[in-house]
Image (spheres, grey):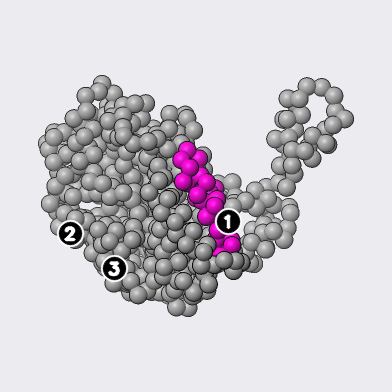
């Protein structure tokens, strides 16, 4: 994870007001985001075993989310407004490569 | 040939869009309808009432040629015939945002009935139905309505709590995506009964499909519910905003922090005005109750738990989905007979009923009838009637830790037992899991849980001890 200190260090040589620099801070996260449900029903269906798959790459930012209402067909994930269900290792790998 | 495929988010997540596209490419006409709620069969293709299950795009030709295998009549599937579908009567049958379909299936009859019999008789009908709040608290809806109706104020509100954040619950989502007019009709009836001019539906941001369907439906029926007005408001990812007072704060543009009660929201709710705050399922049950009468609704159920409950079978369950049934059915029937046991094929170790704040229940207690009082007597809660099934690979110490961790992440921070107690709870469980001073730490955890249960302002801190303590009580071997 990039910390505020890293960003300020990166911009330390830059002159000018702070606001445009803070705008850059907000733009730092440019990777696509996949929200992986880590709530109980998805845990019961094995989402924790998929976490190493998600963490084994850096191209897509993977964040936890608590419940997408797809609790009978988990593990589930949300990318933008697109929902994905019945994820296993192979499907998550393919999904991460496609977003 | 009439082809129906659901456009519910769950069907879409299972690939329904690609299947529908394949049928259209093959020259067929496809109607996108609500979901039957047989989730393990999605994408489910309904051709003139016959079901084709787990369909993929490459099977479309065979289905159209009549050479594919079907499950026969969907309506006669045992998962459907064993239900009493009142709230979900239209599930699988109508196009969610089609006013024509809604009219053709008893739509707007409840609102017409309410207007014909008047506000007082409408509240009487709801009282007679015995309907209790489906969000989890189980408070009689008619009494809440009566309180708001008799409050003297020029402005009153109806707030629909659609912040369905509990894991294992999806019935609210299915109502909003599959039958949005029914929910709007229920809100309009509530508005008419208590004298409220405006209604808000507070939907969580994790439900983009529900938000879109509700917006479309509200625009399409505005003239039918006038002068009552309904508006959608979208949450921002906070679980605690499902608690009614923090939901009201969030609606007012404030931090989603819990309010102390009293004053009751019924008297001083949204913007300080008398407000009915009801769950989606409570309001969605109203049109049926008005159309068919309170007595007809009360003829389902047992004891003081009247009517039907849309039970949600989730987690590691073979036949997951929505099962609407009268109260009184046992947990064992739901999990084993209807749910078919685990999807993994391994033995069921436990179920969690009522979401992240619900108790873990072992199979030895599967004789429990689905009833508010019976569950309370067993130190458990029905909540929003979501059931998460776990097989024997589950580590209950980890699940107890997760319950505390979830509370720590989602606490609004207003009261100390919840804010600090949950973090101390995670730390104590880490000690136990590491095998340090196990007995002393378990005693400490029990004491902490008591403090959280009785000292927290709302159900988040107050009910987190249920999953924690039930895990320790029923599965002590996972902690020692």
User: In the rendered view, does B250 fall on the left or right side of B297?
Assistant: right
Across the whole image, how many numbered discs are drawn on residues?
3
**Residue at horizontal 19%, vertical 48%?**
B289
Q: Secondary structure at mark 3?
A: loop
Marks 1 and 3 sit apart, C-alpha to C-alpha, by: 33 Å
Residue in the foreground of this view, choosing between B230 and B151: B151
Residue B425 on the magenta segment = yes
Residue in the foreground of this view, choosing between B207 and B259: B259
**Proximity of marks 1 and 3: CB atoms separated by less than 8 Å:** no
Disc number lying in front (1 or 3): 1
**Residue at horizontal 42%, vertical 38%?**
B258
Q: Secondary structure at mark 2?
A: loop
Residue receiving disc 3: B368
Point out which mark residue B303 bears.
2
Q: Are marks 3 and 2 on the same chain?
A: yes
Marks 2 and 1 sit apart, C-alpha to C-alpha, by: 42 Å
Q: Main secondary structure of the magenta part?
A: helix
Nearer-N-terminus badge (1/3): 3
**The residue stretch that appears in magenta:** B406-432
**Residue at horizontal 28%, vertical 50%?**
B138
Residue in the foreground of this view, choosing between A86 and B397: B397
Residue B83 image offset from top left, x and y in percent: 27, 64
**Proximity of marks 3 and 2: CB atoms separated by less than 8 Å:** no
Point out which mark residue B99 bears.
none
Q: Quadrant of residue B231?
A: top left
**Residue at horizontal 72%, vertical 61%?**
A56
Point out which mark residue B427 bears.
1
């Amino acid at each position: 994870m990039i910390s505020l200190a890293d960003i300020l260090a990166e911009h330390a040589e830059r002159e000018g007001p702070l606001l445009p620099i803070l705008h850059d801070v907000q733009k730092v996260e440019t990777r696509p985001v996949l929200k992986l449900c880590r709530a109980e029903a998805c845990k019961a269906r094995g989402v924790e075993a998929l976490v190493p798959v998600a963490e084994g790459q850096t191209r897509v930012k993977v964040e936890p989310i608590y419940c997408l209402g797809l609790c009978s067909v988990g593990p589930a994930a949300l990318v933008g407004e697109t929902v994905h269900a019945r994820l296993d290792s192979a499907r998550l790998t393919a999904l991460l490569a496609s977003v | 040939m009439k082809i129906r495929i659901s456009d519910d988010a769950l069907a879409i997540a299972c690939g329904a869009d690609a299947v529908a596209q394949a049928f259209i490419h093959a020259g067929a006409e496809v109607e996108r309808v609500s979901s039957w709620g047989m989730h393990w069969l999605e994408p489910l293709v309904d051709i003139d009432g016959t079901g084709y299950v787990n369909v993929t795009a490459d099977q479309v030709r065979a289905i159209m040629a009549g050479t594919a295998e079907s499950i026969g009549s969907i309506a006669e599937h045992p998962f459907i015939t064993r239900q009493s579908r009142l709230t979900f009567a239209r599930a699988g049958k109508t196009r969610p945002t089609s006013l024509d379909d809604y009219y053709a299936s008893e739509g707007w009859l409840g609102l017409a009935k309410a207007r014909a019999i008047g506000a007082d008789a409408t509240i009487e009908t709801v009282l007679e139905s015995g309907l209790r709040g489906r969000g989890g608290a189980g408070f009689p809806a008619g009494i809440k309505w009566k309180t708001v109706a008799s409050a003297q104020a020029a402005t009153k509100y109806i707030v629909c709590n659609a912040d369905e954040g509990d894991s294992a619950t999806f019935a609210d989502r299915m109502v909003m995506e599959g039958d949005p007019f029914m929910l709007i009709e229920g809100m309009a009836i509530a508005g008419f009964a208590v004298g409220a001019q405006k209604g808000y539906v507070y939907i969580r941001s994790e439900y983009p499909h529900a938000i879109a369907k509700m917006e479309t439906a509200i625009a399409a029926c505005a003239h039918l519910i006038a002068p009552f007005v309904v508006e959608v408001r979208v949450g921002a990812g906070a679980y605690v905003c499902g608690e009614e007072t923090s939901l009201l704060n969030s609606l007012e543009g404030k931090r989603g922090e819990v309010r102390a009660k009293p004053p009751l929201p019924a008297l001083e709710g949204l913007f300080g005005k008398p407000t009915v705050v009801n769950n989606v399922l409570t309001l969605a049950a109203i049109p049926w109750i008005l159309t068919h009468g309170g007595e007809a609704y009360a003829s389902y159920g047992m004891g003081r738990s009247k009517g039907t409950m849309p039970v949600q079978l989730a987690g590691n369950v073979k036949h997951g989905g929505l099962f609407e049934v009268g109260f009184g059915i046992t947990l064992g029937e739901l999990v084993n007979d209807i749910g078919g046991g685990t999807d993994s094929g391994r033995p069921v170790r436990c179920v969690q009923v009522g979401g992240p704040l619900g108790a873990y229940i072992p199979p030895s207690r599967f004789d429990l009838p689905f009833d508010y009082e019976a569950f309370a007597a067993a130190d458990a809660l029905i909540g929003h009637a979501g059931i998460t099934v776990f097989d024997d690979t589950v580590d209950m110490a980890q699940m107890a830790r997760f319950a505390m961790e979830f509370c720590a992440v989602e606490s609004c921070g207003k009261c100390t037992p919840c804010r600090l107690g949950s973090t101390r709870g995670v730390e104590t469980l880490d000690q136990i899991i590491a095998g340090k001073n196990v007995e002393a730490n378990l005693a400490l955890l029990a004491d902490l849980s008591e403090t959280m249960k009785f000292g927290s302002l709302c159900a988040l801190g107050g009910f987190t001890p249920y999953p924690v303590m039930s895990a320790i009580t029923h599965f002590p071997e996972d902690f020692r």
